[in-house]
Image: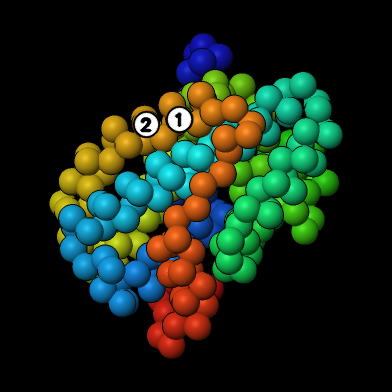
């Protein structure tokens, strides 16, 4: 088996829904958006996911992962510290920040158990984040950066669609149709991230921010706050 094949298999493991980090427990504001009627069918669900994927994931998570990945490869801990603080400051609600930290800490523990020693420093660290640990795994397993970003964007879409299927609800075929529609958006968001300069990183999605903040006080919730 070639090194590139092994790297691809490691990526598949990293983005698998079976990865024990707890991402399935969160909806990133989608639950409230469905509760209040902003999202109520396949079409509005596509618009919601498409908009956040381009304007938030593509302009924040993905370009920061790219910088983490380069920093890990160069052992540039100063850059790691800079971008981890930048990412934490960019999470606009307590819910989104705590989600990032909890999933990041879970992945840090898993990577430590898998023999990635650098991950142990970040266990229970207040600035640990999922993109930070995702990028560390990518660098350690020699996953090419574009593949890593495509995988992150794909996994995020898949998690959002899984939440929508439970909440709207949508059937499994509708879920697959949504994924089909979002393929080009995944590629678009990845290309945006690859091309961004440092000063261009960071955009906001006001609807998602309001939805996440209101979800913290939502009376009946299926997903974690």
Pointers 1 and 2 in contact (C-beta within 8 Å)? yes
As drawn, the residue found furthest toward the bottom would be: 219
Where residue 3 appears, as percent x and y from the top left, is 55, 14
Write the residue at 57% across / 55% down: 21
Q: In this picture, is 167 found above or below 125? A: below
Where residue 88 appears, as percent x and y from the top left, is 68, 53
As drawn, the residue found furthest toward the front would be: 199
- Is 85 on the left or on the right of 95, as rendered? right
Where residue 205 appears, as percent x and y from the top left, is 45, 55
SS for dot 1: helix
Instruction: Bin the neighbour count of mark 2 within 10 Å (Cα to Cα): few under 14, some 14-19, many 20 and up.
Output: some
Q: Which mark is residue 188?
A: 2
Q: In this picture, is 3 found above or below 37? A: above
- Is 215 on the left or on the right of 46, as rendered? right
Where residue 175 appears, as percent x and y from the top left, is 23, 52
Q: Which mark is residue 192?
A: 1
């Amino acid at each position: 088996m070639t090194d590139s094949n092994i790297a691809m298999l490691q990526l598949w493991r990293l983005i698998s829904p079976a990865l024990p980090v707890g991402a399935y427990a969160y909806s990133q504001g989608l639950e409230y958006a469905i509760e209040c009627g902003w999202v109520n069918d396949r079409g509005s669900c596509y618009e919601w996911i498409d908009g956040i994927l381009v304007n938030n994931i593509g302009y924040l998570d993905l370009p920061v992962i790219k910088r983490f990945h380069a920093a890990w490869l160069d052992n540039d801990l100063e850059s790691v510290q800079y971008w981890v603080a930048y990412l934490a400051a960019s999470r606009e609600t307590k819910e989104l920040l705590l989600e990032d930290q909890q999933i990041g800490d879970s992945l840090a523990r898993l990577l430590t158990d898998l023999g990635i020693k650098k991950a142990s420093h970040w266990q229970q660290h207040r600035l640990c984040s999922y993109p930070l640990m995702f990028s560390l795994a990518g660098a350690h397993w020699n996953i090419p950066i574009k593949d890593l970003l495509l995988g992150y964007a794909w996994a995020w879409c898949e998690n959002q669609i899984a939440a929508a299927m439970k909440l709207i609800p949508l059937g499994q075929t509708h879920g697959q149709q949504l994924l089909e529609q979002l393929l080009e958006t995944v590629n678009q968001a990845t290309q945006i991230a690859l091309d961004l300069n440092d000063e261009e990183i960071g955009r906001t999605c006001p609807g998602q921010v309001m939805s996440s903040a209101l979800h913290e006080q939502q009376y009946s919730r299926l997903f974690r706050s």
